[in-house]
Every structure is written in structure tokens, then in C-alpha cells.
Amino acid sequence: MTKNSKIRLFVSIFALVLYSCCLNSAHANSNTTPSVPDSVPAPDSTLKEGWYKTKWGMTIDEIRAVLKEDIKQIAPENRKRYKTDYTYTIPDFKIGNFSFDVCMAFDQQKGLNEVMVTKKDGPDHYACFLELENALKKKYGNPSSTKDQDKIKMGSQMRSREWVTQDTLVRLNHVVLWFSNKAHETTNIMYQSRGDTGADKL
């Protein structure tokens, strides 16, 4: 692994750690069992709206049929870089003017339960963050939570926005880490099912 690859990996892990630390335990789905389900009940009207055109609880075959994207399985050795056991990916997904990697995680019994959408390497991370923020505001309204660490602290800088819907926890992150006087950035959106929190009864 090259030095730049190690740095990109560290930045991604750092962003995921920040995301995990900031989650309210009432929103988090703590009963996720890694791996993709071999058999999940067929989708029905009770499935909750998830990321994009998907619904929480879908199987990978159902997602392929709905999205019609080039979905690939993530090699086991590459899953170790993530805190969550993401098993499938869309390697080049377009949103607006930017390209993203989309990673999907599945509960063994309940199907799709988490999605991470990460901007691909390149410039304009902050511009991407602002564009995504505006789009998410149009869809969900003002954020439920806003956190900005604008001053450089311990070699890092972080911005996050969180939306909580009846079925989904959405978190937009922009993280900057400094190594050897050089900034390394990551911008992503995390989507997580609230299916196990009793949110459908609220």
C-alpha cells in the first residue's frame, strides 16, 4: 500500500470514527450482524424508505433491480478498512457535478440497513459538501443537528450535519486532516436505518 493510500485510508477511518462517536444511541442500530443475507423476505409495503430509490430491508438482488447500477461485491480483505461491514459497492455513482463510491451494509436477517456515499479523491471537497448540504436541506429541511469545528485542532477540522426522519438517520460529513503540512479531505453521507429504534411508533 502506498503512502497516499495509507493516508486516504486513515482519513476515511477517522471520518467513520467521528460519525460513530456523534451518533445518538437511540438512533443507532446496534444489532447489526455482518454479512449479506442469503435469504430475506420479499419486499412489501411495510419496508421503509431508505437511501435514494432503495428501501431498508431490501436484498442485494432487489437493489440491483431497482437501481440498475453496476454493483460489485467488496473483497473481504478490503472490508477491513471500514468500521461497518460493507459488502457491496457502486464504484462510480454520479450526484450533481461529483462522483462517489457507494457502500452498502446488510443485516443478516433484515436486509439493507446502512449506506455510505463517499466523494471520490480529487479537489473541491468543501464545494461538494456545500452542494450536498443544500440538496439535503431541500429534501429534509433544516438539519436536526449542526456541528462545526472550524478552527484547526489536533491537526483536524470537521463539519457535520444530521437529519433524523421517521425511518432514517442521515449524516453529512466533511473532514480535513493535516499530514506533513498537506490537507487530506473526505466528504461523505451516511444513511442508517432506524428500524430497530421503534421510530415507526413515534
Image: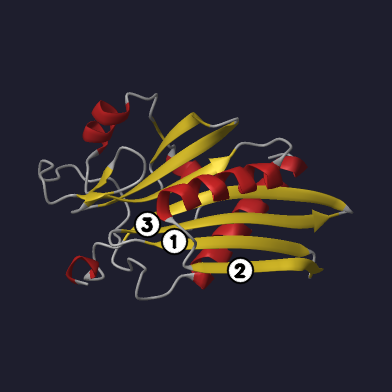
For mark 1, give the secondary structure. Answer: strand
Which residue has dot 2 on it? 147
Q: Quadrant of the N terminus?
A: top right
Foreground residue among 84 and 119: 119
Could you tell me how far apart the alpha carbons at marks 3 and 1 are, in whole angstroms? 11 Å
Secondary element under disc 2, as helix, strand or loop, is strand
Asked if residue 9 lies left or right of residue 91, the reply is right
Residue located farthest toward the bottom when viewing the structure as drawn: 25
**For marks 3 and 1 on the same chain, the one whose residue lies earlier in the sequence:** 1
Q: Which residue is mark 3?
A: 192
Which numbered disc, 2 or 3, marks the residue that appears first in the sequence? Answer: 2
The quadrant of the image that shows the C terminus is bottom left
What crowding class fits label 3: few (fewer than 14 Cα within 10 Å), some (14-19), or many (20 or more)?
many
Horizontal side of residue 91 vs 140, given as left or right: right
- In the rendered image, is residue 6 in sight? no
Q: Who's the residue at 28% across and 62% down the image? A: 166
User: What amino acid is at disc 1?
Assistant: Trp
Secondary structure at numbered mark 3: strand
Pointer 2 and pointer 3: residues touching (CB < 8 Å)? no
Measuring 19% from the left and 65% from the top, which residue is drawn there? 200
Q: Which residue is depicted at the point 49% across and 52% down?
A: 137
Q: Earlier in the sequence, mark 1 or mark 2?
A: 2
Residue at which label 1 appears: 163
Position in image of residue 122 (x %, y %)? 71, 35
Residue 117 percent coordinates (x, y)? 49, 44
Q: Residue at x 46, y 70 (%)?
A: 23
